[in-house]
Every structure is written in structure tokens, then in C-alpha cells.
Amino acid sequence: MRRSFVYSTASFFAFLGIVFIPVPFNLFKKQLSITDFLFGDLIGFVSKNVFRTQLSDTHVYSDTRAMYVLVLILFILSILVTAILSTLKAWRKHKDRVLKFIYLLVCYYLALQLLKYGADKIFKNQFYLPEPNTLYTPTGKVPRDLLYWSSMGTSHFYNVFLGAIEVIAALFLLIKRTRLIGLLVSLFIMLNVLAVNFGFDISVKLFSLLLIFYIIYLLEPYVKSLSQFFFSKTPATVTQFVNKERLVKNRLLSTFLKWFATGIILLEAFYPFMRSGNFNGDKAKRPYMHGAYEVQQFIAGADTLQPNKFPVKRFFIHKDNYMIFQGDNDEMVDYKLVYDTGKQQYVLVDYNMKNEPIWLKYNAADSTLQVSFRLNQLTGKALDWRKLPALQKEFHWTVDE
């Protein structure tokens, strides 16, 4: 009885997590607003009255306090749902089919996440090519998470390798006969992901823990078989699921639903790349004037400064429309670079939402970019940042080549 209660609670917790913990979907973008509508006030109430913490924002994002509170709420809710249903006779009648539905939902959800992350790696969308400002930042000044991300982004081959493993694991999960292999491969993948997230302080720790929980939950029906295989001399028999009853009795309808769900998963994973037509993020189109610039001239008011007096030695145009200035001490100051169509001019926006008009003039003949703001004017020479050693596709069989 206790095992049944625990398994039912785990099932409802998995179900509620899939439905209400927001993740970025391409085909469905309302999950965050639905979660905020249903749980936003409750998250704020629990945080304030239980944890004595006033949240400035109850929107649920990766590794925010709001997300931790939401997970706690969903866990308590799953216990309450299980306790209430266990008292109902109708629950005993439909319990097996409901739990099997949740089991399959979790399986397909896990396959979706693995396929999405796998596709993002193969097409260089997750570990993207390091931006010029990162490449020109001294290693000791780069945060660990960005350092890991940037290092991974320099190798196209390794991204394809990791992504292919995740895609294969996802496809194995979608096929009943290979599901156990897919789960075991997924477990090793996610344990490595979890170690990376904790080791490099990457802010998807809670979500990776949830995915490992989903894997362990899906492995539960196979525990006896795995125990026999590894620790017993008796032959192991693999059980597909504790409940042998078919979820959909009509075989044709069952087949259609499986292929429909698989099609949705494939579309969700590959839609962004099909829409953009870009299957290699390293070669994606960059904004106009994107790149790195070495300051050659700095005019402050009426004074033309000597090179050793330049307060800025480089500046960068980021692919996400940021302008970043690198001081003589290598500290970076970034601004959002926005084009005001009404005034037909560029504007720098700081983190306090203060606007600063800026004028840019690019000279293609000598690859220089002139930047004017306030009474300052600086001119930078474009640097060929793609020729830096970190981005070279070198490979050596021997160390003495």
C-alpha cells in the first residue's frame, strides 16, 4: 500500500512538473503565463510567510527562488491529490490507466527534451561560437559558466558528437523495445549534465535534477529486471510496464496517436532550424558592424588623447545587439544597442534604462568604425577575430607535428 502511494505521488508530481514548470517551447508559448496566473500569488504567499522572503518577481524562470517554491508547491499538491484519490472507489477502477498515461507522457516529454537539446548541439545553437568580446577577455576574468560555454562552442565536432548521443537516446525512448536502453543512456547523459551544471555553476541545476527524477521514475518498472541482471544468477526478464493493459484498445487509433505525438516532438525540436533555414549557428547571419574593434583614436571634447591615455582600448558589437566597451583594465561595460526608427539614430540603453544617443559611421575602405556620443569620439579598427587561435580547426595525431 505504501509503495503504491509513493508511486502514485511520484506520478502526479511528474505530471504537474511537466504541465506547470515553464520551459521554452517553440510551438506553445503560453506555459509561463498559465503558471503565473495559477501559481504566481501562491508562490509569493509561500515565499513571504513560510520562507520569510519577499520576492520581487514571482515569474518562474530557471533556478529562481520562485521556481524552487513552485516545485515545493507541486510536490505538496501531488501528495494531496494522491491522498484524496486513494479514498475514492472510482480511482481504484481507473488508477492503472491513469498512471500508464502519466508514465507514457513522462517518457515522451523526456524524449522531447533530449531531442531538443541534441538538435541544439548538432546545429550549434546551444554552445554557440564565442562572441568577440569573450575572446578578447583575459581568461581569469571570464566567469566559469561562460568559460565552459565558450570552450564548448569552439568545437563543432564535439557538439555534433554530444548532440547525436542525445538524439539517439531520445529515439530509443520512443520505441518500446529499446526504451530501457534509452533510459540508461539518458541517465548517464543527465548525470554528466548535472555534474557540469554544479561544477561550473550553470543555472539549470533544478531542471536537470527534475529530468534525472523523470528518468528514475521511468526506470522504476525495470528495477527488478535490472537487479536480476546485475546481482542475480537467475535469468533477467524485462518488464515493459507494471500494467499490461493497453492504454488505447483500438490498435489503429493507438498507432495514430503514437505517430502524432512523435511528429509533434520532431516538429518542436527541428522547427526553429527549418524556419530559419540555418543548420549551423557558427555561420548564422550577424548584425551589421558585428565584430571587434581596436581603438586607434580617442577624442574627448577638444582633446585628442595619446594611446596610453585611452580609457577604452577595444569595443564590440554583439550578435544580440549589445555594444560593449573594454577598458584599459580589461573590465567590460555593456549597453543594449537599439535603433530608434523615429529619430533614425542608434541609442545605448544601460541597466537603469537610461538612453544615450550615439552616432556610428562605418568606413568599409579601411574597416574602421567611428563612434560619437556626448562630446567623445572614438575610432576603432576592425579586428579579424575569427583568426584567433581558439577558433582554428586544428587537429594533430602526434604532439611533435
Image (tube, grey):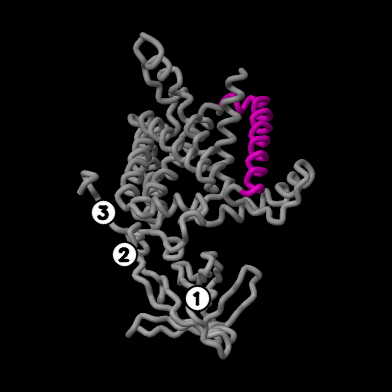
- Residue wearing tag 1: 308
Residue 278, image x, y percentages = 33, 62
Q: Secondary structure at mark 3?
A: loop
Q: Residues within 10 Å of mark 3 (few under 14, many from 20)?
A: few
Q: CA distance from mark 2 to mark 1?
A: 26 Å
Q: CA distance from mark 2 to mark 3?
A: 12 Å
Q: Secondary structure at mark 1?
A: helix
Instruction: Verify CB contact (< 8 Å) between mark 3 and mark 1.
Output: no
Residue 381, image x, y percentages = 39, 78
- Residue wearing tag 2: 387
The mark closer to the camera, 2 or 1, is 1
Query: Which region of the structure is painted magenta?
Result: 64-93
In the image, residue 3 above or below residue 18: above
Three-letter amino acid code at the position of disc 1: Asn
Three-letter amino acid code at the position of disc 3: Glu
- Residue wearing tag 3: 394
